[in-house]
Image (cartoon, rainbow, N blue to C red):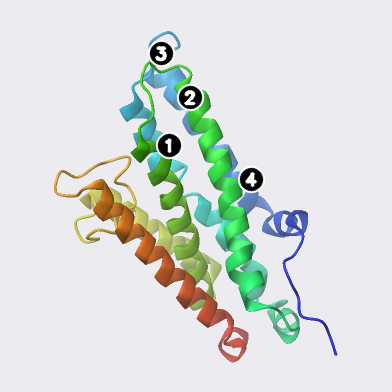
Amino acid sequence: MDSPIKLPPLLTDIKAMEWNFYLPIFVTIISTSYVYVVLAGWNQPLLFSEIKKTLGLWSIPCVSFWTIGLYKNLVDSDGKELLLAMPYKVMQYGFIRTLRMSLIYILFFYTCLLIVLLFSEENMTMVDWILPGVNILFFSFLSFVIILASKNIAISYGLIGVYSSTNFITYGSFSGWVYPFYWSLPRHDLQFLQVLMGLILATFVCIVLGQWILTKKEYLVK
């Protein structure tokens, strides 16, 4: 009897992601450079509000490329039948795998953020330490459930793009407490704890739905 597929090696996942792995890194580096060169003009102290707007609106949602790229082989018609025919442990192949890449992205994001803050006279608050990481986890697991539910890479990119742009344009008017851009574009009618709880609950729902879909091999193979 074949042994269930457990957590794939990290390098294997990165190679399978192809350009999806490099694009968010490129976007974050460009955003960081833009903040320093254009907004600060090389020699002026950076405003933390401008840093949050730029990195928060561009870099944070880009974690979706990592997650979608992570599961593109599972929905790719060329190889998904063979992959789904193999036994795999749902928790490790789904939740743990997505969480691993999300934590790496969080580490990368905060590293870039702290580097930029070296040129700012402002300090990070508790909100700045907590909310970006929660936002990244939310976008990552939202992409997790979308790619598995839609089984289409282009549709997944489109849905994430529409969701992100709609929240940006409307300041999350239709999102309630689940407002992933609160860190970058705060709303006066929302409090940090409300947004934090909303994002945590929404992330949990996405995890449960994604794990449930991952158990439905008959649906995924169609």
In the displayed structure, 192 sits above or below 173; it is above
Judged from the image, the secondary structure of the residue bearing numbered disc 3 is: loop
> Nearer the observer, disc 3 or disc 1?
1
Q: Which mark is residue 41?
A: 3
Residue positioned 55% across, 67% down in the render: 153
Query: Disc 2 vs disc 3: Cβ atoms closer than 8 Å?
Result: no
Q: Quadrant of the C terminus?
A: bottom right
Which residue in the structure is indicated by mark 4?
22
Which of marks 2 and 4 precedes in the sequence? 4
User: What whole-number distance in Å separates the C-alpha atoms at marks 3 and 4?
Assistant: 27 Å
Q: Is residue 70 left or right of residue 183?
A: right
Judged from the image, the secondary structure of the residue bearing numbered disc 2 is: helix
> Nearer the observer, disc 4 or disc 1?
1
**Residue 216, x across and y down, in percent:** 57, 87
Judged from the image, the secondary structure of the residue bearing numbered disc 1 is: helix
Query: Disc 3 vs disc 1: Cβ atoms closer than 8 Å?
Result: no
Q: Residue furthest right?
A: 1
Residue positioned 61% across, 47% down in the render: 104
In the displayed structure, 87 sits above or below 124; it is below
Q: Residue type at mark 2: give it.
A: Val
Instruction: Report the front residue among 68 and 131.
Output: 131
Which of marks 1 and 3 precedes in the sequence? 3
Instruction: Report the front residue among 175 and 155.
Output: 175
> Nearer the observer, disc 1 or disc 2?
2
